[in-house]
Image (cartoon, rainbow, N blue to C red):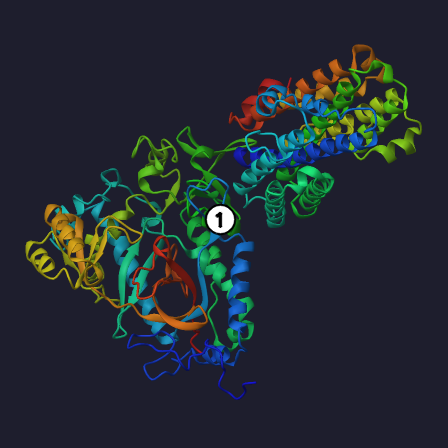
């Protein structure tokens, strides 16, 4: 028998190597970071195999709760769980305060920017953001010019992706202002974690996330057309074959509102109504999880079967509210992103609290030249792709791939940006029978209603493949719970 | 409630009931074969006839052997009314309305479907299927029990009950029809042990043997027909199902009993009053099979009217003005 304080199994931090990276739980001297002590000690005190059993139990629970996504092309209805790792990411109270302030500042500026470009276009006139970059963007919606969204809010629900570089600095990687997904995983991951580590939660002072649906409901209710006191709110989904269907259904259930598809809605006498067993019923606020392009075949893509003909006209007349407003995509265009710090200065006269990752805009000849000469050290991204597609990670790419991207950039410079390769921070992750560091990012969620509210936590996505910097679920990513420590915790 | 959700709840519940009834009449035939195996060759064809899908069966399987019929009724992926296909359809319907039903209902249905999938891959099931049929019946009853004890008894639940009761009325009529097809080739069996055996099998397939005995005692064909068609208290009797469906329908629309505000209430009400004033002898006089045939058509028309009333999307007010005279 082996005894003594040192556990004999591999799931211990004593042999864990941060390999010179920034680790979110363990500092460079191998000690737990502030806020992580209780968790690290608890894991170290577990018997052999116990953490693996917790992990297996968590996976079974996620499956039983039906937190699954559909495997495309499988007609038998095969469902899989989104990979989950039981070791959480921990964010200290003081650091979170900065992030929280930074996100509020950013969302205020972005919202003003969207209202401005579809309104007076002051920022374009003043030459702070180049006019042709905005008006020429694929995500710029001419039909939104002159729109007056309720209460002047465009981006009600935002998911902003944050990363941390090797030196410990936190950057904003991108803003998602269209239909950011993933928040249901945040809530469900937390449920699972509370069952696995009940004692630690109290001792560590982890801030709760359960009230997200209440805040979301309040945010949506705030948008209702003026005379309505008890607004009818719905969640609009593309349907069960959408990869995020679970989340749509989950949020509708949590808020106690109807989940509708496009075919359940109709515009009748200028108002949006849902078809119910007792006839047509007016809808006041729509949390739509359908992209702009598919929202209204009468305005955008005429071939869309998912949307509701006439809904944009009803919106324009102020007879229904949409969250997010159409047209918000202009603010998460990867080229426009490069100007967010300038927007913050322009609209708020403040310095950005959370910095952008330095970004080279290929539309600019000088910057393009620099990018083409340094392809082996940069990450190149297409302006209008997401999910980790259309991307070149210079240092990991072959000469051929770099050649191909050089061609693409030269042909369509407007469509590309480049950034230095950031070595994302890591979190210990179970790999077989031991811990290895895996790279992570963090997506907090920001709601903009009567007030701006930031969910204390967010979705920590983890690149499960060794060495990979791509955290997207479509590319081998999983998730972890995110613990934000309370001020006095 | 959303029309699409109402439609899905109704069909989820119909498909589960359909699967249960398929198991019921396959089970009873199987038992019958065992009881009368000496002298008689196994008669599986009546079961196929009762589904009304003889042509599909003939093209796909040719001969009505035990294995073919069990495979056809239980596991045929391409036949939309096999137990497996019904459960797949029930589960798909449930999947689109998970936010409207209790999660325990979804879990049970999901589990039920996976059990049948597993069974479809084992050969044992084809050789000795009784246990499988029993399991299907129990799983369906469990689903109904969970539905009744976890779901809000509001509009959604009423739609579920409506679907279940219409389906059950139709299937009880088809089970009675099996007896008609069984009898047809052997008129000289009437009144013999074989006849008794067959009638008791019909009762057993709807779990009604004991209840019938308590109420009527001796096996008498007219009493049995009366019991399965016109009894108000026996939960699988057609009259009882139609009554319950009618209750649910009025609970949904809010109209007083014996009035109608929409085509569904009109048709179901007509069917109900027709049954309410019917006597067994009248059924037998017009011919049991013909009567059952007509009944099934009327039940179908109620189903169509339900869709038209609640799901086709015309404003309720307009409909009500049209009907409420």
Give the percent coordinates (x, y) of residue A203.
51, 78
Rendering quarter of residue B63: top right
Q: Is residue A443 left or right of residue A86?
A: left
For label 1, count other residues whose C-alpha is less than 10 Å away and answer few (under 14), some (14-19) or many (20+).
some
Question: Vertical placement of B176 versus A349: above or below?
Answer: above
Q: Which residue is mark 1?
A: A79
In what element is the residue under mark 1?
Answer: strand
> In front: B235, or A113?
B235
Count of numbered circles on the image: 1
Rendering quarter of residue B305: top right
Q: Residue furthest top?
A: B286
Identity of the residue drawn at 83% across and 24% down = B39
Q: Quadrant of the N terminus of chain A?
A: bottom right
> In front: B39, or B216?
B39
> In front: B100, or A63?
A63
Give the percent coordinates (x, y) of residue A441.
33, 64
Identity of the residue drawn at 15% across and 62% down = A376
Q: Is residue A211 visible?
A: no
Q: Is residue B198 left or right of residue A360?
A: right
Question: Vertical placement of A178 versus B215: above or below?
Answer: below
Q: Residue furthest right?
A: B217
Q: Is residue A40 visible?
A: yes
Give the percent coordinates (x, y) of residue A18.
33, 77
**Which chain does the residue under circle 1 lie in?**
A
Q: Residue furthest bottom?
A: A4
Rendering quarter of residue A138: top left
Question: Vertical placement of B318 versus A299: above or below?
Answer: above
Give the percent coordinates (x, y) of residue A433.
46, 71
Identity of the residue drawn at 44% across and 33% down = A263
């Amino acid at each position: 028998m082996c005894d003594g304080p040192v556990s004999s199994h591999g799931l211990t931090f004593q042999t864990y190597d941060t390999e010179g990276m920034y680790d979110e739980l363990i500092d460079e001297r191998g000690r737990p970071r502030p806020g992580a002590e209780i968790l690290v000690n608890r894991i170290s005190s577990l018997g052999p195999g116990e953490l693996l059993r917790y992990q297996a139990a968590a996976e079974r629970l996620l499956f039983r709760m039906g937190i699954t996504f559909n495997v495309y092309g499988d007609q038998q209805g095969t469902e899989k769980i989104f990979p989950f790792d039981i070791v959480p990411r921990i964010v200290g109270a003081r650091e979170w305060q900065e992030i929280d302030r930074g996100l509020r500042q950013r969302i205020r500026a972005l919202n003003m920017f969207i209202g401005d470009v579809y309104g007076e276009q002051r920022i374009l006139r003043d030459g702070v953001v180049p006019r042709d970059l905005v008006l020429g963007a694929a995500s710029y919606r001419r039909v939104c010019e002159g729109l007056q969204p309720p209460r002047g809010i465009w981006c009600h629900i935002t998911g902003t992706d944050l990363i941390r570089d090797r030196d410990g600095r936190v950057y904003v990687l991108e803003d998602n202002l269209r239909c950011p997904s993933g928040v249901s995983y945040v809530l469900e991951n937390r449920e699972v974690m509370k069952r696995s580590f009940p004692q630690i939660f109290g001792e560590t002072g982890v801030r709760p996330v359960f009230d997200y649906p209440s805040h979301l409901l309040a945010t949506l209710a705030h948008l209702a057309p003026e005379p309505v006191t008890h607004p009818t709110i719905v969640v609009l989904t593309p349907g069960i074959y959408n990869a995020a269907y679970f989340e749509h259904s989950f949020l509708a259930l949590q808020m106690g509102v109807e989940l509708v598809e496009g075919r359940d809605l109709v515009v009748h006498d200028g108002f949006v109504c849902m078809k119910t067993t007792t006839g047509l019923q007016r809808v006041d606020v729509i949390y739509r999880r359908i992209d702009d392009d598919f929202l209204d075949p009468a305005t955008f893509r005429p071939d869309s079967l998912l949307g509701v003909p006439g809904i944009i006209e009803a919106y324009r007349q102020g007879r229904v509210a949409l969250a997010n407003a159409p047209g918000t995509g202009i603010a998460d265009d990867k080229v426009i992103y490069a100007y967010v710090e300038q927007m913050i200065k322009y609209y708020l006269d403040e310095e950005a609290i959370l910095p952008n990752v330095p970004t080279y805009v290929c539309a600019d000849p000088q910057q393009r030249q620099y990018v083409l000469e340094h392809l082996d050290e940069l990450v190149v991204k297409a302006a209008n792709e997401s999910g980790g597609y259309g991307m070149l990670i210079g240092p990991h790419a072959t000469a051929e791939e770099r050649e191909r991207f050089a061609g693409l950039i030269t042909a369509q410079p407007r469509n590309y940006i480049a950034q230095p390769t950031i070595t994302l921070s890591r979190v210990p992750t179970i790999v077989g029978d031991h811990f290895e560091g895996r790279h992570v990012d963090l997506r907090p969620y920001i709601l903009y209603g009567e007030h701006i509210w930031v969910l204390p936590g967010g979705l920590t996505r983890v690149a499960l493949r060794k060495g990979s910097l791509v955290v997207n679920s479509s590319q081998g990513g999983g998730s972890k719970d995110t613990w934000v420590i309370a001020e006095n915790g | 409630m959303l029309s699409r959700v109402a439609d899905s709840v109704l069909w989820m519940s119909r498909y589960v009931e359909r699967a249960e009834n398929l198991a019921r009449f396959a089970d009873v035939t199987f038992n019958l074969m065992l009881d009368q195996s000496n002298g008689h060759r196994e008669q599986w064809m009546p079961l196929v006839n009762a589904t009304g899908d003889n042509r599909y069966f003939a093209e796909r399987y040719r001969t009505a052997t035990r294995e073919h019929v069990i495979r056809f009724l239980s596991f045929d992926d391409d036949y939309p009314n096999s137990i497996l296909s019904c459960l797949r359809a029930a589960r798909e319907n449930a999947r689109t309305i998970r936010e409207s039903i209790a999660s325990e209902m979804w879990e049970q249905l999901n589990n039920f479907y996976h059990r049948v999938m597993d069974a479809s891959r084992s050969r044992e099931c084809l050789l000795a299927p009784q246990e499988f049929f029993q399991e299907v019946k129990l799983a369906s009853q469990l689903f109904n029990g969970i539905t009744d004890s976890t779901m809000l008894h509001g509009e959604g639940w009423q739609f579920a009950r409506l679907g279940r009761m219409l389906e059950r009325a139709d299937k009880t009529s088809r089970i009675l029809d099996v007896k008609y097809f069984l009898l047809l080739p052997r008129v000289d069996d009437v009144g013999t042990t074989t006849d008794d055996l067959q009638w008791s099998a019909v009762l057993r397939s709807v779990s009604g043997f004991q209840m019938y005995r308590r109420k009527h005692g001796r096996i008498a064909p007219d009493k049995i027909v009366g019991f399965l068609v016109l009894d108000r208290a026996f939960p699988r009797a057609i009259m009882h199902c139609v009554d319950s469906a009618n209750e649910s329908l009025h609970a949904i629309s809010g109209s007083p009993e014996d009035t109608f505000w929409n085509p569904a209430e009109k048709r179901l009400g007509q069917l109900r009053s027709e049954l309410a004033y019917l006597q067994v002898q009248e059924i037998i006089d017009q011919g049991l099979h013909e009567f059952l045939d007509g009944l099934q058509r009327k039940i179908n028309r109620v189903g169509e009217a339900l869709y038209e009333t609640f799901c086709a999307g015309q404003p309720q007010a307009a409909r009500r003005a049209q009907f409420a005279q």
